[in-house]
Amino acid sequence: MSLIVTGTIGIDNVETPTGSAEGILGGSCAYFAAAASCYTSTRIVAAVGDDWPADHRSMLESFPGIDLAGLETRAGSKTFRWGGKYLENMNDRETLFTDLGVLEEAPPAIPDAFQDSEIVFLANTHPGVQRGFLKSLPNRKFTVADTMDLWINIARDDLVGLLGEIDGIVINDSEALLLTEHRNPFTAAKAIMEMGPKVVIIKKGEHGAVLVTPEGVAVIPAYPADETMVVDPTGCGDSFAGGFMGYIASRGSWEFSDLQAAMAWGTVSASFTLGAFALEGLQGLTMEGLEERMAKYQAAARVGDVNSIV
């Protein structure tokens, strides 16, 4: 089934305990599409300025499954830029600067050729903009969104309106707490479901993620990455979403068992992002490489034989 992602393409400066990189490709669309393209063709809708480096376009073009027909380059505009510094634990980070650039302008239009898209991911941006995109996607069958604490704080009404129009949401535990005032992720997920979406995924960083739907609950661990594997956590959440939605689109189904499997594939996809700056960890990745790491993940997550204590 056709997969589309709307969101941001950016230029990042990143500092981590293992090193730093300046002027690298970033943005939610970039990470999502790179991960999703391993599973299925992925359409991007985003905008950049005329300062966007040619080698960034070449990087995205190196992923054969990415369709860039919906990527606008705007003359006289500036590309979204972000700078961040990760602390020693690699979980916490400081934002050093944010230059919104084209994000302060009108959102990009969804090309006519993309309006038949059936599987939709609304990557993190203002929920009012996310709702606007839905008007151009009348054939959508399964729609999932991402959000962040900023929108919960300043655009709550728009976000609640969006939740009433989508099938699922991917959110981290601190955002779920902010949105629902429930610290327990399962309680928070049920509260979010009452707002509309029937599929709620709450990410817990190094502690994995939980899935809550009317059909059941699933818990999945993070990929067992040691310190030598972790270079840059930027984009891991978007890569998780890309693997998750890419798998769903390739299957054409979002039954509970498919959602569980998609979470595992999303986790494995994100583990490749961890290992390098920008998209380098995902570049050249094949299903064979994903399946090899999935086997290791399954072996680590499997519960062995359990004897009865009765």
Image (cartoon, rainbow, N blue to C red):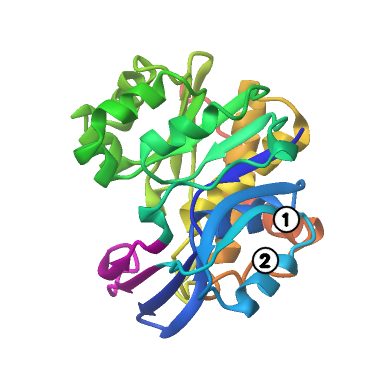
Query: Depth check: 20 or 308 in front?
Result: 20
Q: Report which quarter residue 256 is drawn in.
A: top right
Task: Name the N-terminal-most of marks 1 and 2.
Answer: 2
Q: Residue at point 53% right, 47% down?
A: 108
The relative height of residue 283 versus residue 262 in the rendered view (above or below) is below
Local packing at callout 2 (Cα closer than 10 Å; few below 14, some 14-19, many 20+) is: many
Answer with left or right where residue 236 lies relative to residue 66.
left
Residue 89 at x, y = what percent? 30, 69
User: Residue 99 lies in magenta, yes or no?
Assistant: yes
Q: Residue at point 37% right, 36% down?
A: 127
> Which residue does the numbered mark 1 point to in the structure image?
66
Query: Depth check: 46 or 240 in front?
Result: 46
> Which residue does the numbered mark 2 point to in the structure image?
60
The majority secondary structure of the magenta stretch comes to: strand
Residue type at mark 1?
A: Ile
Tell me where the magenta segment starts and ends, as one range.
Answer: 81-101
